[in-house]
Image (spheres, coloured by chain):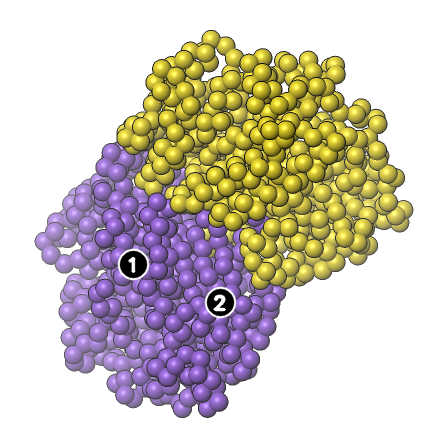
Chain colours: A yellow, B purple
Amino acid sequence: MSEQPELTIQGWGPRPADDGSAGLEAAVPKAARRYLGRELGWTPRPTPAVPVAEIRLGPSRLPDAARTALIELLGEDAVSTDRESRLRHAGGKSYLDLLRRREGDASEAPDAVVRPGTTEETAALLSLCSARGIVVVPFGGGTSVVGGLAGVDADDRPTVAVDLSRMASVQALDVPSSLVTVGPGLRGPALEEVLGREGLTFGHLPQSWEFATLGGYAATRSAGQSSTGIGRFDELVAGVTLATPSGVLELGHPPASAAGPDLLGLALGSEGTLGIITELRLRVRPRPPASSYEGWSFRTWAAGLAAMQRLARHDLLPDVVRLSDSDETRANLLMAAGAGAKALRGSLRARGHGQGCLLVLGWEGLPDLVRARQRAAASLLRDGGAVRLGRRVGESWRRNRFSAPYLRDRLLDGGLLVETLETAATWTALPTVYDATRRALRESLTRGGHAPLVMTHLSHGYPTGASLYFTVLADRDDALPIQQWLTAKRAATDALLAAGGTLTHHHAVGADHRPWLEREVGPLGVEVLRAVKQRLDPNGICNPGVLLPD
Amino acid sequence: MSEQPELTIQGWGPRPADDGSAGLEAAVPKAARRYLGRELGWTPRPTPAVPVAEIRLGPSRLPDAARTALIELLGEDAVSTDRESRLRHAGGKSYLDLLRRREGDASEAPDAVVRPGTTEETAALLSLCSARGIVVVPFGGGTSVVGGLAGVDADDRPTVAVDLSRMASVQALDVPSSLVTVGPGLRGPALEEVLGREGLTFGHLPQSWEFATLGGYAATRSAGQSSTGIGRFDELVAGVTLATPSGVLELGHPPASAAGPDLLGLALGSEGTLGIITELRLRVRPRPPASSYEGWSFRTWAAGLAAMQRLARHDLLPDVVRLSDSDETRANLLMAAGAGAKALRGSLRARGHGQGCLLVLGWEGLPDLVRARQRAAASLLRDGGAVRLGRRVGESWRRNRFSAPYLRDRLLDGGLLVETLETAATWTALPTVYDATRRALRESLTRGGHAPLVMTHLSHGYPTGASLYFTVLADRDDALPIQQWLTAKRAATDALLAAGGTLTHHHAVGADHRPWLEREVGPLGVEVLRAVKQRLDPNGICNPGVLLPD
């Protein structure tokens, strides 16, 4: 298996060699920098992260007796309290996480990192921690963007991060049943490597694919870029093993069952609050023999939305769907350097699509079926006023599908606020959710007469609605950057919920969204979740800082 | 809206005019009767139901004060304690239910029938019944075949059936979002009538379609005959309102959400044990412009299974899939009278498929896509040794898709044991589950040297596996008919679980399967369900006789 890359402590990709401004210049074309400067009132300035050696970290609070018991259970090598291990498991990769780590704050760092190797060890670990009052935060890829690894505990008990990297193998492959059994610490690239040898694929490709783990996808109800075609991660899970302080649950009975309420659906999205997923049974598929990615353009966002709705209604959405609004389209075209991009911009202007909306569609499957679906969809798209731009635009998106978080590091180096948020709503509510969220973000983040840049795309499409993904760029408030974003995030979340959006379509609740969970599921819904947690985790040691409001 | 037909108290369809043997003769062709007589050692004999007037029913145990309080809440017209109402709400339509009702036993009858008209009334009703210790059994279509309406209570408290027929309207239709909001008492035909006017369809068509309600489908995780294409009922539910003794839950956020564990999935399949579903938001779709039903034949069951697995793996299964084993195929061909059937039998024999397995495939959708999928599937099927029989076989199945329960009444009139059971398993486990279940049924039901007839079909197909549906015919033990079936059912259930099948794929748990729930979800899984129930229904008044073991 290939060597797995590691996320850096203060960002996504490697740190630039110098003070950071050269990194920004290499990552963002001049025209785009000028545009951002003008729009945002932003002056590019080096705002580098403090050196890792200067990150502040208190001493481990893990009691000696607990450390000894953990070592007895898991072995000396599987229990770490050193600075490097603790820093590597401090929080996730949200804008707020990165701000804190770049400023030298690692207060979310666990007191220790433990690495169980089996379901049995994990169950024993949870039982031990429950008895000793030690908080447990499961750690998969560490890519949470919603504070899923916050490790905050109202009782301020010592905390261990449970690193799942030792449980990262492909345990069984049942080819006739299209099922693979894996450990929770396995990452997508390693899984695809094993499946590829059998002509199979899993196909779940979120932006965090290089680093995130399969257990993490399950715990957070992830959705990949091809979710429109192959389904959300939760739809690809046939079963999980969930170790809890009260014992081990084996959940899910493929292919389907009517034997009572769905307990598997309680483990999915539980974000470590009920226990730790120690094994997953996932649906795989044959590698599609044909794939075709193409670009289209609409004159307006409304026309694009209407066409997507019609495709969805007639079950003609392809595997990948990404409709960018005009703000995102303009920024994407500015970011794409080179002659091809220039020609494309010219051609769009000539067709009256200069302020248009780009659509990327990706089709996969048997060649005849791909062609038949493409033809049927093309006819609906043309009826909706779309212009076909061809494969180059589609392939360009596909090449860069994992690049945004690397770019974010460079934008942070240069003094920008960069964050994303997402929701989903019915087709009927979608335009209102779009307007309300943008307005809230723009009102909250306008500084010195300059509004932020809010770029939006519709990605995951369903018959009943779709998700919206917002990327926000603004001139950072260097004095109070955390407060600046918290205020904007609060305004945006209030607005999107009021307009009928869901609290989160695929980023999960974490610490950041938990004040709103009750608005999403109601007070009695929260009580039901508490009753389940109380039964499985009576001492409340399982990731108490996330999901459920205090 | 058309008049809705009513199920009869002792069966599915209307009673025959005379002693029943003429009914049997009209319903079953002579060749089939002879075949059954020879195979089962069965002598056709009139075993008619006792007249309805002779069904034994004790006096209502509902206390006067409770009756007064119910009338105060719901109105005089919405509270019934008369004999006819109580008999019409006594149990469901399993073989055991029908045996009991035909013998004059209505001991499961509720003490009263109440008919709330709104969510608020239902919530108030549950709160009232919880305070007064009155057991509540929700009643939709009354079509349960697993004792879902058993109304058994360990504390022997008075019981009311909550008839949902007053909450049976289409409340809202959001065409762009493909969502319809309905009351739980609405039936499929009435929903299709409303949707048809808008060019839409819901498409969920189980065998009970004429009588079952949408709320019942949700409470039992139903699957319709087109589930392979459009999905199980639970996949078509965007949200439900669940009234419980502790308050009202609004569950589900279309199109999808990552905001924590799936609470909607707890309401689905809850079989009335957590409360009563008072509203459903369902996904609809445009009426498919093309549909094509066709028949195929395989020489053997194993060849048929292998071909279905390959279709599933390559995402080429159509909307309807039904592969009958050779026992079911032979019986179906004997039941089909007329020249066409005779010619088909001859043609199959001539091709060496005299002991073959019939396959019905139903394709629906846009004409071009239906053709492209049919072509791709046909190529895989021919590679797997299948012979195409054409549309007549497919259309014949389609015409008779709801007829089996009517036929069952007539077979019961003539002294037969007739029951069905079902399960699902992965493609890998399916052959073992098939063999083990058949063997258990045959061993248990062999009488006087005659084995029962066990007919099986694969219906609902998934990438990871499929369901198996068994129909059992045997010479009834007139002295101990209930014991005869209970023994066989126990043996079959033990066998299919041991072989890796699920307890139930679409009939639900009810009273009949609850002794095995712990084997399906484990003791801790049962404890989680109990914790949820305890929070929502602390006095245990909600359908205590089903789902959860005592």
Q: Is residue A147 left or right of residue A157?
A: left
The image quadrant that residue B451 belongs to is bottom left
Q: Label 1 is placed on what type of residue?
A: Leu
Image: B32 above or below A252 = below
Image: A333 above or below A257 = above
Residue B243's mark? 2
Residue at screen point 85% across, 49% down: A66
Quadrant for the N terminus of chain B in the image: bottom left
Chain assignment, label 1: B
Position of residue A402 measured from the top left corner of the image (x, y, whole percent)? 56, 26
Q: Label 2 is placed on what type of residue?
A: Ala
Position of residue A99 measured from the top left corner of the image (x, y, whole percent)? 72, 32
From this viewpoint, which residue is outermost toward the right?
A64
Q: Is residue B55 left or right of residue A403?
A: left
Residue at screen point 37% across, 57% down: B181
Q: Badge 1 is on which residue?
A: B191
Quadrant for the C terminus of chain B in the image: bottom right
